[in-house]
Amino acid sequence: MTLTQQSAPYAHWDFVHPSNGDRLRIIPERGGLVSGWSCGGREILYFDQDRYADPSKSIRGGIPVLFPICGNLPGDVLPVDGVDHPLKQHGFARDLPWQLQLLEDQSGVCLSLSSTDETLKAYPFPFRLEMELRPVASALEISTSVHNCGDAAMPFSFGLHPYFNVSDLAQTRLTGLAECCLNHLEMAEASTADQLKRLPEGVDFLCRPAGPVSLIDDATGVTLQLQHQAPLDLSVVWTEPPRPMVCLEPWTGPRQALVSGDRKLVLEPGAKQTLVCRYTVSYTHLTLPTKRIV
């Protein structure tokens, strides 16, 4: 079977690509979380299994989904038509149970989430999300459709928060980012080069579109490239030492976009928008020093 339910090392669904053997681990009931991606026999995603076992703690690992906001809002409230709706950081999609099904061609899976009475209290817009994940050769393609199921224009932001394994933050580089960024820790403009020097100390910054972004682990020779398409083309970089991971996140809009209007997306009633990104894995063969024979 291509999609099977597993109980170890924790309850999850296991998808194995029928051609290349690459594997996804999915936990639909915990925010539609993809907790593992094995590509060419190497686990690409970081996942803190001990923390995951405590439901009172936020998850550290996998690919959490950010919707209907990325980041936070002032006072953690979303004002709509004069009414303040409580909406916490990154929204609620990462906390709710999703539905999971196999794609018809068996090349991947589809995760879906629809609005409920509870989500309407925080975000008064009926919606449906459908996220298709395909582990193609040496890559993971993610295509998300956002549907406005209501009768009013629907503002939203969308993002992904994937955690990637690295061997050592001090031997990790990123290329392809814009020269300037927004330092989320100070909410001030900063030099991207200066922020990248601080990966081992902990960073949280956002870059405007500049093309594909590569995460390079010099110790292992593994390069992960994020290829994103507008409007899912902002790049957020986050580290939390001593965790051996880097988050390289595609967002549609910055923090507070639904209030500031900066890159706020709006869907008309009955409309949908498809957001696409792709992570590609490549390897540089490291040359080990050889002893000179005399």
Image: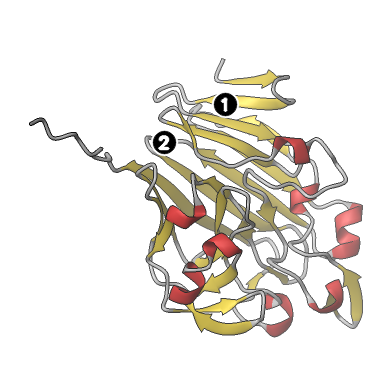
Q: Is residue 189 left or right of residue 255?
A: left
Above or below 237: residue 104? above
Looking at this view, name the residue that lies furthest to the top: 1
Looking at this view, name the residue that lies furthest to the front: 294
Given residues 169 and 204, the one toward you in this image is 169
Q: Residues within 10 Å of mark 2 (few under 14, many from 20)?
A: some
Q: At 55% from the left edge and 60% from the top edge, which residue is drawn? A: 200
The spot of residue 135 in percent (x, y) is 47, 36
Q: Residues within 10 Å of mark 1 (few under 14, many from 20)?
A: many
Please tell me in which quadrant of the rendered image residue 263 appears. bottom right
Element carrying mark 1? strand
Q: At 51% from the left edge and 27% from the top edge, which residue is drawn? A: 106
Give, as a three-letter code, the residue at label 2. Val
Q: Is residue 32 left or right of residue 24?
A: right
Q: Determine which residue is flagged by label 2.
A: 136
Q: Is residue 31 left or right of residue 217?
A: right
Total marks drawn?
A: 2
The spot of residue 71 in percent (x, y) is 70, 68
Give, as a three-letter code, the residue at label 1. Phe
Given residues 294 and 279, the one toward you in this image is 294
Determine if residue 105 is in view: yes
Visual colour scheme: secondary structure
Q: Quadrant of the N terminus?
A: top right
Given residues 68 and 288, the one toward you in this image is 288
Q: Which mark is residue 15?
A: 1
Q: Which mark is residue 123?
A: none
The spot of residue 11 in percent (x, y) is 74, 25
Element carrying mark 2? loop
Please tell me which of labels 1 and 2 falls first in the chain: 1
Given residues 177 and 103, the one toward you in this image is 177
